[in-house]
């Protein structure tokens, strides 16, 4: 988990609390912990100052209008069919939801905003000052529960699900349920407090506690629903609550046309099936049901155009139960098909029978993989094969335009012209990311040959020998990659040279807050269970003599100092290896303030002041160890 706390708003204990929370085992879908969710989805956690106010814009006005129309439509249907229990039940549910949409807005706005998930930045933002303002004695409870709630939103926005509409009145109670589920399954001491806190919310958030109680009462379907969410439901859908129980909206038909996604609502043709829908924004006509026999497709479309739709159709959508004579399948407009249709599908807007393409899969950028005679091949956007059907597995194209293919137990890389740019001769192959490659020049891969790892480029040129037991990192900001032989580690550069020999028990990059020019890079290196600092050319900056501590900062701060520990004593060392703050203090050294040194109105450098403890007394020192009067 990457916590970005530029203003040092969290204490070391609070930061450690967050880090410990993320690592606790908690299974959700394919993920095994909150940290696993954040890491795989590349979500950063930002700690920011302030006490922001909550806003819902015009969401509730739109929700109220939506449910008013639903209520009036169903009421009219009920008047025409007063004996129909199904219609009566739907009308009464719509009436209850219309009432709730009118009263929940105020309660929602009165809630404090303690954190949020920003989908555009793919980042969680926490506001500890707002938490302290809510109740300073419960800041740890707020910190953990708010963080877990926002991780749920990041999970909901995972690839493949982010396209579905954000249904506030469903997603927020689900996020509260997910948070409570996490606290309960990790045996958190904050669970009872959090449950009471959620129960006391007088808007949709409060339903999260009811869902949790229902789950503990034996309704296992609720966790499966949480794991599958987001699913295609309307933006203004709400939970059904009656007789003390929650009923959750079912998945509907979701259509994404020209990056304008919507969940469709079908309307009967005449007063009987088949059904249709029309989306004016994307000029999309949807057809479902049985269009054979008396329902001649061309006649029905003519009627729809004349009485219901505008004069042009730019897209056609075929619903899951669509049935038609074979002559009706030849459309001259781009066609989409419900993924639940049993017989038909569309490929690049062309309607085809699944039987003819039963094992075809899209893997982006207009390319498809198709299985024939139990072997896979690649098709272009016009369904023309560009490779033979000879592969056992084909993965997606990576950012270098190569896809991993497998024959038997061996792997290689194929480009978009169907050429095996890296022959199928390796036991494994994976893209190595490159932190300093901003121009997307040469790409590197780690590959296995004879059970040993090595590095090659995208044209199969060997960069290193195949002699390593593992290649642990990608290339970092300094162009170095961590490699391992046996239990020892080193750093290799892009020319295949071991710039730091394989002789250390561990190596970690030390971040440098004042290194803006990306000059000398520093690493923490471990030898004989002691650690010290080296540079990227293996020059020893300090002796290898320090003890590890989970609280020791893994960085040089704004004053160019890094925390070190010997036994139970702490100090700070500079980039020349000098213990600028002696290793004598009794607890972790805390950065309390950062001062800005200016010249001609511009900041030239930043310097830190530190909180320390010595002989039981706590006080503040500057970067040279001089005591500062409070």
Image (tube, helix red, strand yellow):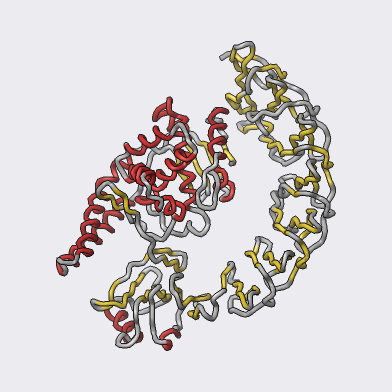
Q: Which residue in the rendered view is the most extreme toward the front?
A: 218
The residue closer to the viewer here, 582 or 609, is: 582
Quadrant in the picture for residue 116: top left
Q: Is residue 596 visible?
A: yes
Q: Is residue 281 left or right of residue 6?
A: left
Which corner quadrant holds the C terminus? top right
The residue closer to the viewer here, 220 or 594, is: 220
* Percent coordinates x, y for residue 374 in the rendering: 63, 75
- Residue sitting at 67 percent across and 15 percent down? 626
Q: Is residue 111 left or right of residue 424?
A: left
* Percent coordinates x, y for residue 316 in the rendering: 41, 76
**In this view, 497 is above or below 423:** above
**In this view, 553 is above or below 99:** above
The residue closer to the viewer here, 327 or 259, is: 327
* Percent coordinates x, y for residue 414 in the rendering: 71, 68
**In this view, 428 is above or below 130:** below
Quadrant in the picture for residue 340: bottom left
Q: Is residue 599 visible?
A: no
- Residue sitting at 29 percent across and 77 percent down? 273
- Residue sitting at 25 percent across and 78 percent down? 270
* Percent coordinates x, y for residue 578 in the rendering: 77, 24
Q: Is residue 500 left or right of residue 625?
A: right
Which corner quadrant holds the N terminus? top right
Q: Is residue 70 left or right of residue 583?
A: left
Quadrant in the picture for residue 250: bottom left
Question: What is the count of numbered marks?
Answer: 0
- Residue sitting at 54 percent across and 81 percent down? 356
């Amino acid at each position: 988990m990457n916590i970005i706390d530029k203003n040092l708003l969290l204490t070391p204990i609070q930061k450690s609390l967050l880090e410990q929370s993320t690592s606790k085992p908690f299974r959700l879908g394919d993920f095994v912990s909150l940290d696993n969710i954040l890491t795989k989805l590349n979500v950063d956690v930002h700690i920011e100052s302030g006490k922001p106010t909550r806003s819902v814009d015009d969401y509730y006005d739109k929700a109220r209008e939506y449910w008013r129309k639903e209520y009036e439509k169903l009421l009219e249907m009920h008047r025409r069919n007063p004996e129909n229990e199904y219609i009566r039940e739907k009308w009464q549910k719509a009436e209850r939801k219309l009432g709730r949409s009118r009263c929940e807005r105020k309660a929602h706005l009165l809630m404090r905003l303690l954190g949020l998930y920003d989908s555009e930045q793919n980042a969680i933002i926490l506001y500890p000052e707002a938490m302290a303002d809510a109740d300073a004695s419960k800041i740890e409870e707020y910190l953990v529960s708010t963080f877990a709630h926002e991780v749920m939103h990041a999970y909901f926005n995972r690839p493949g699900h982010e396209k579905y509409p954000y249904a506030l009145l469903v997603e927020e109670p689900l996020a509260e349920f997910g948070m409570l589920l996490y606290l309960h399954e990790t045996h958190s001491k904050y669970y009872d407090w959090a449950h009471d806190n959620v129960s006391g919310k007088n808007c949709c958030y409060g339903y999260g506690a009811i869902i949790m109680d229902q789950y503990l009462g034996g309704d296992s379907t609720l966790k499966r629903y949480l794991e599958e969410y987001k699913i295609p439901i309307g933006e203004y859908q709400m939970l059904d609550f009656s007789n003390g129980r929650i009923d959750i909206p079912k998945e509907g038909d979701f259509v994404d046309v020209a990056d304008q996604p919507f969940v469709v609502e079908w309307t009967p043709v005449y007063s009987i099936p088949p059904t249709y829908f029309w989306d004016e924004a994307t000029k999309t006509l949807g057809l479902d049901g049985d269009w054979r026999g008396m329902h001649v497709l061309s006649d029905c479309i003519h009627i729809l155009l004349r009485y219901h739709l505008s004069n042009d159709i730019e897209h056609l959508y075929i619903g899951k139960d669509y049935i038609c004579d074979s002559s009706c399948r030849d459309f001259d407009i781009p066609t989409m098909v419900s993924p639940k249709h049993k017989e038909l599908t569309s490929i690049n807007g062309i309607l085809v029978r699944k039987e003819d393409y039963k094992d075809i899969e899209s893997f982006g950028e207009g390319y498809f993989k198709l299985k024939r005679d139990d072997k896979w091949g690649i098709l272009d956007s016009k369904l023309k094969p560009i490779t033979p059907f000879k592969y056992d597995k084909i993965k997606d194209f990576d950012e270098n335009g190569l896809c991993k293919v497998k024959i038997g137990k061996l792997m290689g890389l194929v480009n978009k012209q169907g050429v095996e740019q890296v022959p199928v001769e390796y036991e494994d192959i994976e893209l190595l990311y490159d932190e300093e490659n901003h121009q997307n020049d040469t790409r590197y891969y780690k590959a296995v040959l004879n059970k040993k790892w090595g590095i090659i480029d995208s044209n199969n040129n060997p960069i290193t020998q195949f002699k390593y037991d593992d290649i642990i990192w990608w290339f970092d900001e300094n162009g170095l990659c961590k490699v391992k032989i046996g239990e020892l580690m080193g750093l290799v550069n892009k020319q295949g040279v071991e710039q730091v020999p394989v002789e250390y028990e561990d190596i970690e990059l030390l971040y440098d807050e004042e290194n803006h020019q990306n000059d000398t890079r520093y690493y923490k290196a471990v030898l004989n269970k002691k650690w010290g600092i080296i540079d990227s050319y293996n020059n020893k900056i300090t002796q290898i003599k320090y003890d590890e501590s989970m609280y020791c900062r893994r960085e040089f701060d704004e004053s160019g100092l890094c925390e070190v520990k010997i036994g139970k004593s702490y100090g700070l060392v500079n980039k020349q290896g000098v213990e600028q703050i002696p290793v004598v203090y009794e607890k972790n050294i805390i950065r309390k303030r950062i001062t800005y040194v200016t010249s001609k109105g511009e900041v030239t450098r930043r310097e830190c002041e530190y909180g320390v403890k010595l002989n039981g007394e706590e006080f503040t020192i500057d970067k040279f160890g001089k005591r500062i009067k409070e």
